[in-house]
Structure formats: C-alpha cells, structure tokens
Image: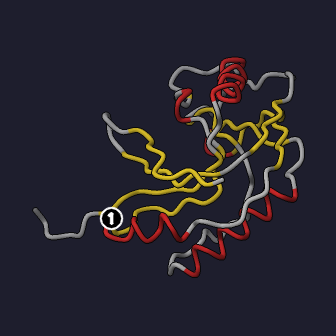
Amino acid sequence: MDGAPATTRLFLALWPEPAVRDQLRTWRDAWAWPHGATPVAAGKLHLTLHFLGSVPSERVPALLDGFTLPFTPFTVDLGRAVLWPHGIAVLEPLEAPPDLLALHARLGEALTTLGLQPEARPYRPHVTMARRAGAALPPQAGPSITWDVRGYALVESRPGAGGGYTVLRAYS
C-alpha cells in the first residue's frame, strides 16, 4: 500500500430511463465506425452535467446530500450527431434547454459550496457515442429523441477492465 487516501471518480449526469437509452443506442448504432473506434456501451450512455474527477472516498457521504437541489422536470431534444476534435463522437441537443443550463449552473454552485472546483471550459451538453472515432461518419439524420428529464444522478466511474458506472444517488 502506498499510503495514499482512497479516491472515488465521480460525475453528475442525466441518467436515461430504458426507453431513452434504447433510442440513444439506435443513434449510436447508426454511425459508420472506423476500425479502432470504441462505441460507448449502451449501459453507459448518459448526458454529463459535471465531471468531479477523483475525490477522497471519505467525502462521498457528504457529497450525496450536498447535491440535493430543487428540481423541476424539463425536456431535452437530442438529434444532432457531431464529430468533435480528438475523435469524440457525440449526440447533441437540437437546442440546449434553459432548464438544463440552469441545472448545470446550480450544480456548479453546489460544487463550489462543497469545496470542489467546477470545470473551467464552457458547458456543451452532449451524449458521448464513441471515442477514438476520428474517421467516423455520423448519420445524416434521424428522429430526434425527446428526453423527459425527471432528475439527475451522482455516478461513480470505476476504471479498468472490470470497471463500469454505478448510480450512487438519483435526485428528482
């Protein structure tokens, strides 16, 4: 043991219910992926609100309550397939809803209150479809996904071959 304190990788996200997840998977599968691309597994498709990174595991219980905020349901219409720099394939909203941007801002304030630093780069809401996809061809068009958002989640990301995502708490 190296004596370093245990850490937990965390992020806040909109976590889709099964019907929306199926629609996201359909969009993901409509891309033409180049050899070496890594499509995101269906069970991991989500819309990130804030990436917290590695935080001391002893802080997780306090964070669970610290992200409880008033929430009003809203709708996100996804339907713009885009290839970002560095080979990141994403599905973006047709237009970022004001309620989504307000939730992102309120959670950023909660991060600051909890002594955590929100990311400095501008927020670009999206669902990552694949990584290492520099030569991918996005689908020309498809039906938009109307996502009735009823809450958000604090999620743990476990790296490595046995890794995955675990919703630690859903907020609504």
Front in this rendered view, residue 151 or 97: 151
**Position in image of residue 75 (x %, y %):** 83, 44
The residue to which callout 1 is attached is: 57
Colouring scheme applied when the structure was drawn: secondary structure
- Residue drawn at x 57%, y 81% is 113
**Position in image of residue 82 (x %, y %):** 77, 37
Q: Amino acid at mark 1?
A: Ser
- Residue drawn at x 66%, y 67% is 69
Left or right, 81 with respect to 62, comes to right
Residue 139 location, quadrant: top right
At mark 1, the secondary structure is helix
Left or right, 64 with respect to 83, comes to left
**For mark 1, does the 10 Å Cα neighbourhood hold few (<14), some (14 to 19), or many (20 or more) residues?**
few
**Position in image of residue 155 (x %, y %):** 49, 51
Front in this rendered view, residue 171 or 139: 171
**Position in image of residue 86 (x %, y %):** 61, 44
Residue 71 location, quadrant: bottom right
In this view, which residue lies farthest toward the left? 1
Give above or below for 154 relative to 90.
below
Front in this rendered view, residue 79 or 166: 166
Front in this rendered view, residue 169 or 44: 169
- Quarter of the image for the N terminus: give it: bottom left
Residue 142 location, quadrant: top right
- Residue drawn at x 37%, y 71% is 59
